[in-house]
């Protein structure tokens, strides 16, 4: 039963926003549920936990209660989001031209576990984000130049925050992965400070921050060409057993 203080809608994830085979891109669905919990406000970070893969082209229940939101499929909890007061640490700025040069070292060009991923997959230009993070020489960073497709705007001509969350997502994994390696996003905590504009160019930067058993930790950021921070995130990935 839905209470008076609870809002509930039915949503579906279009196949365009896929990540692993048959499931939503983790960053995109995290950003979508984050917006349900927090609206369009950018005054704090939101922590999103992914409990299970989110199916595509399927009716799902998105519930908002106070500042929290959940996404469920039947009785299965898929995603939950909650604002947090944490100040996120962004990896260092990498200029766009240097970030773009790093793409030549993208491990996914040799062997990609999820080649159709919306964020980092080898999709056609204008379809996916085509963010290909490679090692930045002489640093512990990976980076890519992001050329924002003009096909990603909503009905108001705005690039949704969910797309920015997708950009922040995979780069934290590729900070760890070698060709053919993979993991699934378990948690993404992010804060978007500024809008991203269609047709714009940005640097996407990631850094591995540790590993504990099957858990991989990383942080990421999106920067404007002048070094202004657009968004920052930290992530936890779960590697296969």
Image (tube, rainbow, N blue to C red):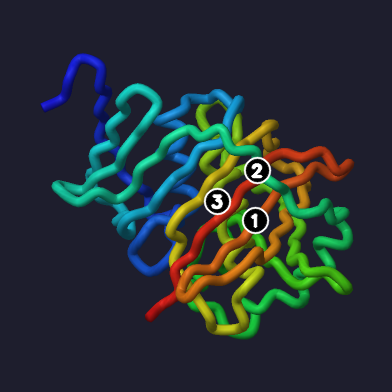
Q: Secondary structure at mark 1?
A: strand
Residue at the far top in the pictured view: 4
Q: Tell me where residue 239 appears, x and y as whole percent.
A: 45, 74
Q: Nearer the viewer, residue 149 or 64?
A: 64
Query: Label 3, on which residue?
Result: 166
From mark 3 to mark 1, how far is it between C-alphas?
13 Å
Query: Label 1, on which residue?
Result: 219
Q: Is residue 135 above or below residue 225?
A: below
Q: Tell me where residue 77 appears, x and y as whole percent.
A: 25, 48
Q: Quadrant of the N terminus?
A: top left
Q: Residue at x 72, y 48 (%)?
A: 90
Asked if the residues shown at circle 3 and circle 1 are in contact, with their CB atoms under 8 angstroms apart, the answer is no
Q: Secondary structure at mark 2?
A: loop
Q: Is residue 11 above or below residue 58?
A: above
Question: Closer to the camera: disc 2 or disc 3?
Answer: 2
Query: Label 2, on which residue?
Result: 88
**Label located before the other in sequence (1 or 2):** 2
Q: Quadrant of residue 192?
A: top right
Q: Is residue 190 left or right of residue 99?
A: left
Q: Residue at x 45, y 53 (%)?
A: 17
Asked whether residue 124 appears in the rendered view, the answer is: no
Asked if the residues shown at circle 1 and circle 2 are in contact, with their CB atoms under 8 angstroms apart, the answer is yes
Q: Quadrant of the C terminus?
A: bottom left
């Amino acid at each position: 039963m839905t209470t008076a203080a609870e809002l509930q809608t039915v949503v579906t994830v279009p196949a365009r926003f896929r990540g692993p085979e048959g499931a939503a891109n983790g960053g995109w669905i995290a950003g979508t549920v984050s917006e349900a919990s927090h609206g369009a406000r950018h005054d704090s970070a939101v922590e999103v936990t992914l409990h299970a893969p989110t199916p595509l082209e399927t009716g799902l229940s998105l519930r908002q209660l106070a500042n929290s939101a959940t996404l469920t499929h039947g009785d299965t909890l898929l995603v939950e989001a909650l604002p947090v007061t944490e100040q996120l640490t962004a990896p260092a700025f990498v200029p766009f031209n240097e970030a773009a040069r790093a793409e030549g070292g993208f491990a996914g060009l040799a062997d990609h576990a999820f080649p159709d991923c919306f964020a980092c997959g080898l999709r056609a230009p204008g379809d996916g984000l085509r963010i290909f993070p490679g090692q930045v020489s002489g640093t512990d960073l990976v980076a890519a130049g992001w050329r924002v497709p003009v096909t990603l705007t909503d009905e108001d001509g705005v690039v949704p925050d969910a797309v920015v969350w997708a950009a922040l997502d995979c780069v934290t994994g590729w900070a760890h992965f070698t060709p053919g390696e993979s993991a699934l996003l378990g948690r993404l905590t992010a804060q978007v400070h500024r809008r991203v504009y269609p047709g714009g160019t940005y640097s996407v930067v990631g850094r591995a921050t540790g590993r504990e058993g099957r858990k991989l930790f990383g942080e990421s950021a999106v920067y404007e060409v002048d070094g202004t921070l657009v968004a920052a995130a930290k992530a936890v990935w779960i590697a296969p057993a």
